[in-house]
Amino acid sequence: MFRWMQSITAKVLGIGLLALIMLIPLTQADGLVRERQAMREQASVRVADGWGGPQTLGGLVLAVPTRYETKGSDGKVASVRDGTEIVLADQQSTVADLTVERRHVGMYEVPVYTGDVTLHGRLLPEDIRRFAADSDATWYTGRAELRLLIADTRGVQDVGSVTVDGRPVRLASSASRMGPYTVLSAPIEIDPERTTPIDFSATLRIAGTESFSTLPLARTNSARIRSAWPDPGFTGAMLPGKRRVDASGFDATWQVLDLNRAYGQHWDAANVDVANRLASSAFGVKLYQPGSVYQQNDRAGKYGLLFIALTFVAFFLFEILKGLRLHPVQYLLIGAAMTSFYVLLLALSEQIGFGPAYAVAAATVVLIVGGYAMAALRARGAGLCLGGVLALVYVILYGLIGAEQYALLIGSVVLVAVIALLMYLTRRIDWYAYGTPPPLASTETP
């Protein structure tokens, strides 16, 4: 049994087992990244609590009180139900200019914005008459109101003006809600005999955190969002038809029709299904922070086991090709040094940024492992060579982290190249000769 444990086969199996054991600290490091990322998200929530959260602006819609009467067999009214019918505009345009700044909670940075928003639109009286005629309810257009949908009223900093047909009206808080959105309302009287469109406009300043979206609450919707933020992430149900993104910021426009959404031009406000569909139709922009330290740490950790295994293989080849020997405990210490790289990288990247943190953490581990190899193998050249190999590994890893779109391609090419190199270096090795344990010394006396 002892002779088999001294064989090359047992050594290979032992090194493979040690590489798998390294999954334990790598998993712990990955959990630490996720924990720190959750703390960053909590910082974003704290900023949103005092500033305004991710904002969604729904534009202005018409809410008309209605009454449903059910008659009995004798022709008299048996029951009455009051409701509200929501009617959407024929056209609506939204223009938002976002001024972005960075807020800090401890060491965490959160992008917030102040947006100057202008809304213009028009309602068609013939739509109201047609929808009322098709309904079983009585519509009280003289007691209608305009409703502005907004995700977080804490972010409403100023309502500059709201006009209907050029006449000012005042928005007020309302107890009504439409799906996940809060409602601000203004009373409006509609002449049932009116034939000309009802024009409305509004200007307001809203504050929000990390994202701004709008809802397509008209038959024809146009939206334009502009900002000096250079890294927008366009999100939601629709992507912009036109956009400009450069170092000076972005300028994006959308054109959305009623055909592009999952609800019609009018519905009963009590219809929960339609209210829930509103959020899924939102579109807009997120103030994306490219390559955040947590995303980059997460990408680095995904290649951890592979690069630890490659380092173990490099040390093993030195044992075979140079006739040197390392104990499994020494492999374990080398693996521990390499896993500590990810913890050191996370801690430093939160303070000095990912690039400098990566350089410091990689240099530290290369010096530790290279110096240890030099002492353990009692060969300066071997230690320098292995340190160089490890430095090359970290250079490749950094390239994989930075090349997000081509990471799979680069990683697969590097992996194939490494395997080909290993096959070339070991092509003349007689593994059977290495796999035969040395004969036991004879104890017989002559």
Image (cartoon, rainbow, N blue to C red):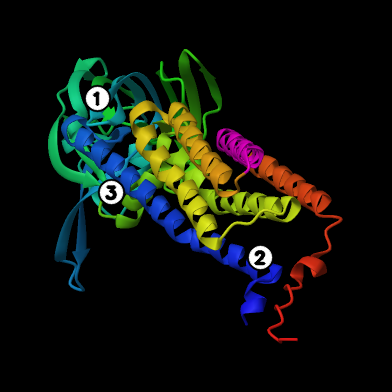
Front residue of 367/251: it is 367
Three-letter code for the amino acid on which mark 2 is drawn:
Val
Q: State the residue position of label 2.
A: 12
Q: Earlier in the sequence, mark 2 or mark 3?
A: 2
Split into 4 quadrants, where in the image is the C terminus? bottom right
Q: Is residue 184 above or below residue 336?
A: above
Q: Is residue 329 visible?
A: yes
**Three-letter amino acid code at the position of disc 1:** Ile
* Residue ID at (36%, 24%): 121
Q: Residue at x 74, y 76 (%)?
A: 439
Residue 413, given in percent of the width and then of the height, sits at: 73, 43
Tag 1: Cα neighbours inside 10 Å, few (<14), some, or many (≥20)?
many
Quadrant in the picture for residue 125: top left
Majority secondary structure of the magenta segment?
Answer: helix
- The residue shown at (56%, 35%) is 398
Q: Going from the N terminus, do you reach mark 1 or mark 2 first?
A: 2
Q: Secondary structure at mark 2?
A: helix
**Start-end of magenta stretch:** 379-406
The numbered dot on residue 45 is none
Q: Residues within 10 Å of mark 2 (few under 14, many from 20)?
A: some
